[in-house]
Amino acid sequence: MKKILFFLLAAIFCFSLTACGETPAPEKAADGTPWSEDWVTISNVMGVDTPEGLTLRDNKDALAASGMYYSTWSIGEESSYMDKTEEGEKEVTIYDAQVFLLLSGSSSVEETEKNREEWLAMADEHYQIDSKETGTWNGQEFTLISYRLTDSPYARGASAFGIYGNYAVIAEFSCQESFEGEPREYLDTFLKHCHYGA
């Protein structure tokens, strides 16, 4: 499965680490909105007011000690898919559509920008990119790409690459061919529901 998050999350799944303790949520978001306990809080960096139609599947601080966090949401029913890798076949659970949110913390702004650029380079290498643009959602700037996928159970997708403080942020919406709706529109809605720690 040639997906950016497959490569990025591979490290997470290899470690089987437990969370190192929860970081308290901020009192307010950067835009002044009171932080809601109903939001999905990722470290103390982001809070996601889950859009209607999405179901939270996972929220992990699996590599919190190294500054990596991820959360996933889905749309539709789950099914099994045999993912073929260089190591062999592995059964994975897929949905009609899904969202991954990944944060990777660094010790400097320069290192954070380098991580974001590496993620964009991986997208150029592994995706059939249809469009690329820059936009701002909830005060944060992202580079957004739309693309088609090969060698994957998902056929279409859209990803947003950004930086918040010393965190590189990627949000990715991918869906099966039969899914009704445009990934770009779903990702746009998701980004509008993301809030950032003050």
Image (cartoon, grey):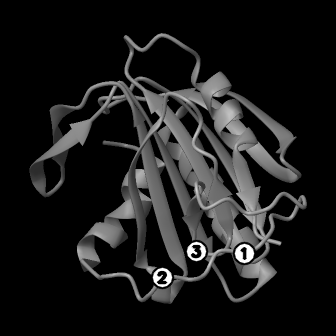
Disc 2 target residue: 64
Residue at image location 54% in from the left, 60% down from the top: 102
Which one is nearer the viewer's eye here, 21 or 127?
A: 21
Residue at image location 58% in from the left, 64% down from the top: 41
Q: Residues within 10 Å of mark 2 (few under 14, many from 20)?
A: many
SS of the residue at dot 1? Answer: loop
Above-or-below relation of 45 to 194: below
SS of the residue at dot 3? Answer: loop
Which one is nearer the viewer's eye here, 73 or 81?
A: 73
Disc 3 target residue: 43
Disc 2 residue type? Ala
Query: In the rendered view, does 46 fall on the left or right side of 78?
Result: right
Percent x, y of residue 165 = 79, 74
Residue at image location 84% in from the left, 40% down from the top: 134
**Mark 2 and 3 residues: CB-CB less than 8 Å, in contact?**
yes
Taking the image as drawn, is residue 22 in sight?
A: yes
Disc 3 residue type? Ser
Disc 1 target residue: 26
Disc 1 residue type? Pro
Image quarter of the C terminus:
bottom right
